[in-house]
Amino acid sequence: MSRYKLVSIEKSAPPQGQSGDNWYCYVIASATSNIVSYRRGTLAETRAVARECVMHLNSQLVGVPSREFVRRAYPVADVDPLPAA
């Protein structure tokens, strides 16, 4: 199975029906799929949430049930290859 990685985080307009000017869009991808999500907050908060999502998705690849998800000590470069802003 393909591992997921964070491939981009960009400042974004709010999703339809939402307000505010502090939205980010992030994309998580594997060899076979892309996940596009929006998060309101700072870039650092969005990056942290996106990293959590990547770690959670990758933990499912090794057969860990989601109800037993535990933070794994993946190297940051393995989860988030984007340069820190």
Image (spheres, grey):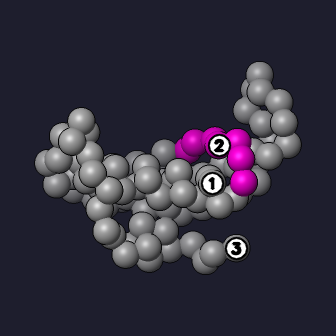
**Residue 46 picture location, percent across and down:** 62, 53
**Residue 9 picture location, percent across and down:** 64, 58
The stretch of residues the image draws in magenta is 36-42
Query: Looking at the rendered structure, which numbered label has been put on residue 85?
Result: 3
Q: Which residue is drawn at 84% across and 36% down?
A: 20
Name the residue tied to disc 2: 39
| 72 within the magenta span | no
> Would you call the spot at circle 1 few (<14 residues within 10 Å), some (14-19), or many (20 or more)?
few
| 40 within the magenta span | yes
Q: What residue type is labelled 3?
A: Ala
Query: Between marks 1 and 3, how big is the CA–CA gap?
Result: 12 Å
Quadrant of the rendered image containing residue 44: bottom right
**Residue 69 picture location, percent across and down:** 26, 46
Where 2 falls versus 83 (above or below)?
above
Where 40 falls versus 29 (above or below)?
above
Label located before the other in sequence (1 or 3): 1
Q: What residue type is labelled 2?
A: Arg
> Would you call the spot at circle 3 few (<14 residues within 10 Å), some (14-19), or many (20 or more)?
few
Q: Which element carries disc 2, helix, strand or loop?
A: strand
* Of labels 1 and 3, the one closer to you: 1
Q: Which element carries disc 1, helix, strand or loop?
A: helix
Side of 28 relative to 12 (left or right)? left
For the C terminus, the image quarter is bottom right
Side of 3 relative to 39 (left or right)? left
Asked whether the residues under the numbered discs 2 and 1 touch, taking CB atoms below 8 Å apart as contact, a structural biologist would say: yes
Query: Between marks 2 and 1, how big is the CA–CA gap?
Result: 9 Å
Q: Which residue is drawn at 49% across and 45% down?
A: 35
Q: Residue at x 70, y 42 (%)?
A: 40
Label located before the other in sequence (2 or 1): 2
Q: Residue at x 47, y 58 (%)?
A: 51
Name the residue tied to disc 1: 45
Q: What residue type is labelled 1?
A: Glu
